[in-house]
Amino acid sequence: MHFYKGINYYDSPTIIMGRIMNVDSALGGINDGSVVAISGFNIAATPEFLILKLYERYRDTGHPRDLFIVADTLPAARERALDFVAKSMIKDGDFDFIRGFMLPFLGVAPWLQRLAIENRVEAYSFPIGVATKWFRSVASGIPTITKVGLGTFLDPRQDGIYLNDLARERRTCKVELVSINGDEYLLYDCPKPSVGLIRGSATDEFGNLTMSEEAIYSSVLAITQAVKAQPNPGTVIAQVLYVSRFVNPRDVHVPGPLIDHIVVSPPEYHMQSASVKYDPSVCGRFMLSNACLSDNDVPDFESAIARRIVLEFVNLVERLGKPITINLGIGIPALAARIIKSEGIDDYITITVESGPWGGIALGGDDFGVAISPRAIIPMPDQFIMYEGGIIDAASLGFMQVGPNGDVNPSFLSERVTGPGGFPVIAHGTPRLYFAGAFTAGNRDIVVKNGKLTIVRDGSIIKFVKKPYKIGFNAELGLKAGKDVMYITERAVFRLTSEGLVLEEYAPGIDIEKDVLAKMEFKPVVSRHIRPMDSAVFREGPMRLLDVVTNAIRR
């Protein structure tokens, strides 16, 4: 007889109804060839215990095998959860457990990337917002049709959603060009999931699932609905940390009748993010009034880029005369969250993260998707409606390459398969885009001091190229949609126009010809009104932006 947190499982109504059980019994009904939907944004809301135990079951028995995995983002971090499974498959040389996957993001999962690059399994990738929409569409019995991806690598006239040759050959998931009333759209399709592996914080004795201690909601409810929808309703297995006698009905995220089996996880496989075991400020239990992860005093060249991004957001507050809502992408743009907080202007610039948090301080790296002291957390499908519909005011996204007409490759190289992530949906819908990143790549020594930028040793890899490897943002379509688009680096700021890129600003201390124009594979238009970047970006100490935004709001 098993006791946990004072609950005798075998005396509870849930056990009588057969929902709470040991993990082997819960996973025992998953058949060979199943399509398994898994929740999770990196480790946040990822049922890591269920994933590892399912793979352990395969290694012990040879079953289930030939699984096809679909997810709303990425249920993994480096060598954790699904990436640990991929590592083990490669080390063992056994590729029969997973026959393929559709994962929107692989950036923090190097072993899953290897499975795709080495053509070991079928590998497909929808944008995150399309994947969340797809789960809801499956639940509703309707096709997933959107303009997201037109004119980019996702368009079947370019590469499509196929990450390797096995995917191009088998087409288990597909993207097609369709016409509705003379307009072009993309139709995304994948097989309906027969199994759902989800995660919540606790369940009550009737199986109702709450996510009250999770950092995000992910697409847990949408995945559950997709699995349970007709035809052929499937099996939903939930991982929880606690069993409670009572859960407030208003806190129930997934009603008990939609869940077939519940497994209690050891705490080490139920963390809020890759490095956060439990922090009440992450799940909204309380807000830290003094939360700040940067003193914003001595900028390096990456934080100088982040400071210039923040200046553009402040300029937007001034132009609109109201607070704004934004999105920050992974990498250098995410650093802007710390600047906004340390400048004390987070009441006027609300940051959203793809996974669902609004406000607070977004974490980076393998913890990306989680925020400290968010003011609101909404389900990820709803968050992406905000992006696709252009409901937010602006976004700053990273770039790897920029082409002569402003096309952006966010992250793709021949030897690196990261997936589109949330980039295509945000770039498609958001009315103002500030692409941000270092001007060059490679081994660099770039110094920020006394309001100037000094390039001691420049990177050898050029990022402003004649032809980007893949297109994630189509500049021509962006201009047609009336978007305001800028490209912000540590040494130069460009604006997108019908003539291509226009160089508008340069960093104090650099030589425009030697440090900018000579390090590009094409020649941009140089503005007749070119000016130095604000030296405050390169100086120690805060930029004192609170007075600027408060005065703008008062006008």
Image: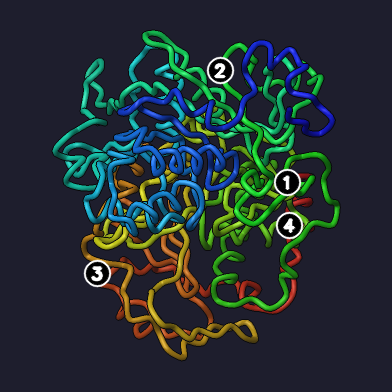
Labelled pair 1, 2 in contact (Cβ < 8 Å): no
Give the residue number, with chain letter if any, for mark 1: 282
Q: Is residue 472 above or below residue 540?
A: above
- Mark 1 and mark 2: Cα distance apart in space: 29 Å
As helix, strand or loop, the secondary structure at mark 3 comes to loop
**Label 2 crowd (10 A; few <14 / some 14-19 / many >=20):** some
> Which label's residue is closer to the chain start, 2 or 3?
2
State the residue at coordinates (52%, 75%): 532
> Which label's residue is closer to the chain start, 3 or 4?
4
Q: Quadrant of the C terminus?
A: top right
Q: Nearer the viewer, residue 387 or 274?
A: 274
> Which label's residue is closer to the chain start, 1 or 2?
2
Can you give x and y, in whole percent of width and height, for residue 103 in the image?
38, 41
- Mark 3 and mark 4: Cα distance apart in space: 37 Å
- Mark in front: 1 vs 2: 2
Give the residue number, with chain letter if any, for mark 4: 341
Give the residue number, with chain letter if any, for mark 3: 522
Q: Is residue 453 above or below residue 389?
A: below
